[in-house]
Amino acid sequence: MPKPVPAAKPGKDVEMREVCVELGKVNRSSGTQQCSSSTEQDRGLTADQPSTTRRCLVSGSPGAAASRGGRGGATLTGALSPGVGYTAILISLYIGFFYNVIIAWALHYLLSSFTTELPWTHCNHSWNSPRCSDARAPNASSGPNGTSRTTPAAEYFERGVLHLHESQGIDDLGPPRWQLTSCLVLVIVLLYFSLWKGVKTSGKVVWITATMPYVVLFALLLRGITLPGAVDGIRAYLSVDFHRLCEASVWIDAAIQICFSLGVGLGVLIAFSSYNKFTNNCYRDAIITTSVNSLTSFSSGFVVFSFLGYMAQKHSVPIGDVAKDGPGLIFIIYPEALATLPLSSVWAVVFFVMLLTLGIDSAMGGMESVITGLADEFQLLHRHRELFTLLVVLATFLLSLFCVTNGGIYVFTLLDHFAAGTSILFGVLMEVIGVAWFYGVWQFSDDIKQMTGRRPSLYWRLCWKFVSPCFLLFVVVVSIATFRPPHYGAYVFPEWANALGWAIAASSMSVVPIYAAYKLCSLPGSSREKLAYAITPETEHGRVDSGEVRQFTGPGLEFQVPADHRCFWSPGRQLMA
């Protein structure tokens, strides 16, 4: 799940960081669909192509290039690059530890929906507290002894499903709940049999998991816009506070959201597109994938806010008081809204089937990036892919058990906050630098021309060379400088938990400098020769031996731009044409 954001303005941020990030992830599967007719043999497992290393700058182009080399997410460009690939693999693995729990929650809700009366409709269940109130209005906001009221939907999620009331905090987790553990086992089994044969199986499964959510989303949209108060919710959704663009947190959240929804920096795109043929039109795929992602997120905002407007009018409260951050929007607000509709059980089944297919689709992408990346890097794992797949999903299951305990939501929140926040932005920054500055934009453009028949325009080359690295560097630095400790409701995590979270984040980011230091120490030659070997693809090491390093031009560093606009930089010398 994406990171929670402040509830001061629920408009764009709530949509961006919650349900819409789930719906946006559908677009990862576009790469899978194109792979569905491919096999391992389509990848032409040879090692004659230096472009095995391009990563996620244009969706599909890295993997299409990788189809010549059969390399997954662990290789970028040059000897330093595997560190970046391993960073992406680690982040995907960390996300799997808690993302599978979301699918287990959705499965639990789905099974609970097959009843005449949804269990989160009233306060007459064993898990309800005296604070529970069926009414949600300003005059019913106080419970016994002045305590705040809670809704049946909120108590069902936190007390009926999570059993959060039996935990005092992250240092009091308790045992795994058998109901959630059973759901988690079913999710893991489904994931394994969707992945064990690679794209031979996942490419078929994705036709269901990627298309069904759009059908359900359209049905929910038609129902949502007919509800009373929907117009107010949509009006709130379309109203933009441009002053918030001056807040760094908005840009950080937007960058993380894009990484999640498109799978950038997670190795998902590179893993799936590596099964494409080398001549696949990666430029077309990039435009289609990003466009569908944006349109899906934008259209799903109408679904979200039509229901938020309905709930706000029903309870006579502002929309800002209805919206929740974290998993609350999906597992509290939406179930509460669905429970008030005619045929509520039917709508609940439809909604949670959509969440289940979305979750499986995204989890398959994350696990595939881990499996393909490591299996292509180590032939032993490649030869025993089915066993390796089993070990990966079992590892994620065992660590996910911490998230299905009484205090599991605290572990979930900690992982969500640290595992794929700053670290994923750092990983993408390293990928951009590796491709644009080490491998070279001009060489990268040549490789894309080999695949598509045309060279990327100047706009894309400038973005890869300057705009993207500068923006990513900005958001990485600011995200660290403006760090906000995680919290769940009123619970504030202890210092040791924050230290553990930073250790998790650093464990993936540190792979890049550690591997770089190792390679620089192990390579032969002078410091300049070590650097030349390190930033040069292995297929060009012969040019380094002969003294020809295209990344260097005498004392200056060459920018990889067209020959008629060749520029050089060196200490004390300005940029010159």
Image (cartoon, rainbow, N blue to C red):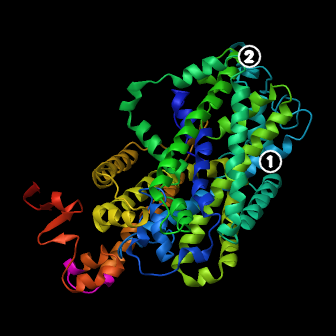
Q: Position of residue 429 (x, y in %)?
A: 37, 56
Q: Position of residue 218 (x, y in %)?
A: 69, 35
Residue bearing the label numbered 1 = 108
Q: Is residue 190 left or right of residue 21?
A: right
Q: Position of residue 278 (x, y in %)?
A: 48, 69
What distance separates the C-alpha of mark 1 from that of mark 2? 30 Å
Instruction: Residue 525: say if magenta.
Output: yes
Q: Residue at x 75, y 21 (%)?
A: 143
Asked whether disc 1 touches disc 2, contact meaning CB atoms under 8 Å apart, the reply is: no
What amino acid is labelled 1 in the image?
Answer: His
Question: In this rendering, is residue 105 above or below 223?
Answer: below
Q: Position of residue 293 (x, y in %)?
A: 54, 44
- Identity of the residue furthest to the left in this view: 572
What amino acid is labelled 2 in the image?
Answer: Ala
Question: In this rendering, is residue 463 above or below 18?
Answer: below
**For mark 2, does the 10 Å Cα neighbourhood hold few (<14), some (14 to 19), or many (20 or more) residues?**
few
Instruction: Residue 461: say if magenta.
Output: no
Tag 1's secondary structure? helix
* Quarter residue 523 falls in: bottom left
- Identity of the residue furthest to the front in this view: 453
- Identity of the residue furthest to the right in this view: 116
Q: Residue at x 43, y 42 (%)?
A: 252
Q: Is residue 407 left or right of residue 48?
A: right
Q: Magenta segment range?
A: 521-529
Question: In this rendering, is residue 369 above or below 285?
Answer: below
Q: Nearer the viewer, residue 535 or 455?
A: 455
Residue bearing the label numbered 2 = 140
Q: Nearer the viewer, residue 78 or 406?
A: 78
Please tell me whether mark 1 or mark 2 is closer to you in this view: 1
Question: Which mark sits nearer the N-terminus, 1 or 2?
Answer: 1
